[in-house]
Amino acid sequence: MCKKGSKSYSVFALKCPRCHEGEMFETGSWSFVKPFDMLQRCPQCDLNYFPEPGYYYGAMFISYIWTAWFCLFFVAMVHWILGWGLNMAFGLLIAFLAINFVYIFRISRLMWLNLNVRYDPNAAGKAGK
């Protein structure tokens, strides 16, 4: 499921959706140094990560939708299954989201880009040609 060539590999490994080798972001997954800075193009296949102005507005909706569902399930699980209080459940949720907000932002952008770009195993190494 998360092997090279699958959409999930590109999304969760934060790799270019076309070649699955190039990085999309300047820093690591949970880096708080330049957390939102993306490369302009893939260093391996030269895919333009910014095809048009405002391209990533759709990623905001993806982020909102899956974060909202995650929050509902997280609080329900902690409150009903583990039997902890609502204040503790929301406190844990806030802590979790504060630590992972950069990763959530990045995954949402990758999900949006993967909707429009197909994997091409022959694309790697075409940068600069």
Image (cartoon, helix red, strand yellow):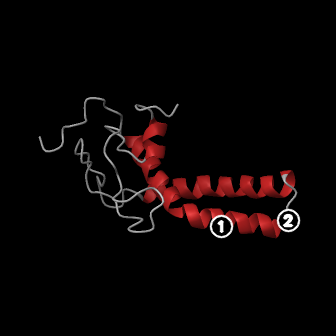
Q: Residue 95: which disc?
A: 1
Q: Residue under circle 2? A: 85
> Looking at the figure, which quarter contains the C terminus?
top left
* Direction from residue 19 to residue 126 in the image, left or right: left
Looking at the picture, how far across and down is residue 87, in whole percent? 80, 70
Task: Name the amino acid, label 2.
Answer: Gly
Of residue 62 and residue 30, the one placed in the foreground of this image is: 30
Establish if 113 lies above or below 75: above
**How far apart are labels 1 and 2 at the CA level?**
16 Å
Answer above or below: position of 49 versus 127.
Answer: below
Residue 82 image position (x, y, % from top left): 84, 54
The percent position of residue 68, horizontal first and vertical second, equals: 65, 57
Which of the 4 image quadrants contains residue 72?
A: bottom right
Amino acid on which the number 1 mark rests in the picture: Ala
Residue drawn at the location 60% of the way across and 54% of the way down: 65
Q: Which of the 4 quarters of the picture holds residue 78?
A: bottom right
Name the residue rendered at 31%, 31% in the picture. 120
